[in-house]
Amino acid sequence: MNDQLYQDRIVALAKAKTGAGKLDAPTRSARRDNPLCGDRVTMDVKLDGQGRITEIAHQVRGCLLCQASASALSAVAVGRDSAGISDIRRDAERALGREAGDPREPFTAFTPVATHKSRQECVLLPFEALKDALS
């Protein structure tokens, strides 16, 4: 594995563990697995009456990229509904070179992963779990 993938910003996001844990009585919860690499993410959310996230938590059993992505996502998800989460996902997709344009923070940290196609799903797995929890 290329050391560039584990640059300081990605390591810092993973170590921050923003949102790590489990919510008591979440409104919704979903788990996603990546059978190719063994990553597993569970996302818990509490929603208000308009479908906006009021609290979020994640449990990640996976690589540093998956942990960092879940932490980054949790840092910016509160106050957003499913459309807002889709906007955030586009930032991750831009960082991975899958969409045109410049990503916003904190997802700029994942730009080194753009050259490692096999690892991009590790970054996107938390988004998939959150999408399931919101649907």
Image (cartoon, rainbow, N blue to C red):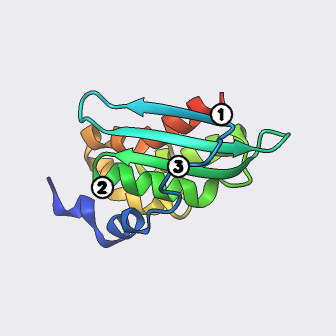
The answer to whether mark 1 and mark 2 are in CB contact below 8 A is: no
Please identify the quadrant where the C terminus is shown. top right
Task: Report the Cα–Cα distance between label 1 and label 3.
Answer: 16 Å
Q: Secondary structure at mark 2?
A: helix
State left or right for residue 52 relative to residue 129: right
Q: Percent position (x, y) of residue 18? A: 50, 62
The answer to whether mark 3 and mark 2 are in CB contact below 8 A is: no
Corner quadrant of residue 118: top left
Residue at the far front in the pictured view: 24
Task: Report the Cα–Cα distance between label 1 and label 2.
Answer: 24 Å
- Badge 1: residue crowd in 10 Å (few <14, some 14–19, many ≥20): many
Amino acid type of the residue that numbered disc 1 sits on in the rendered structure: Leu
Residue at the image point whose x is 51% and y is 46% from the top: 100
Corner quadrant of residue 27: top right
Read off the residue under disc 3. 22
Residue 64 numbered tag: 2
Q: Secondary structure at mark 3?
A: loop
Residue at the far right in the pictured view: 49
State left or right for residue 52 relative to residue 39: right
Q: Is residue 80 visible?
A: yes
Amino acid type of the residue that numbered disc 3 sits on in the rendered structure: Lys
Read off the residue under disc 1. 134
Against 24, residue 15 (above or below) is: below
Q: Percent position (x, y) of residue 99? A: 49, 42
Q: Is residue 102 visible?
A: no
Amino acid type of the residue that numbered disc 2 sits on in the rendered structure: Leu
Q: Earlier in the sequence, mark 1 or mark 2?
A: 2
Q: Earlier in the sequence, mark 1 or mark 3?
A: 3
Q: Earlier in the sequence, mark 3 or mark 2?
A: 3
The answer to whether mark 1 and mark 3 are in CB contact below 8 A is: no
Residue at the image point whose x is 43% and y is 68% from the top: 16
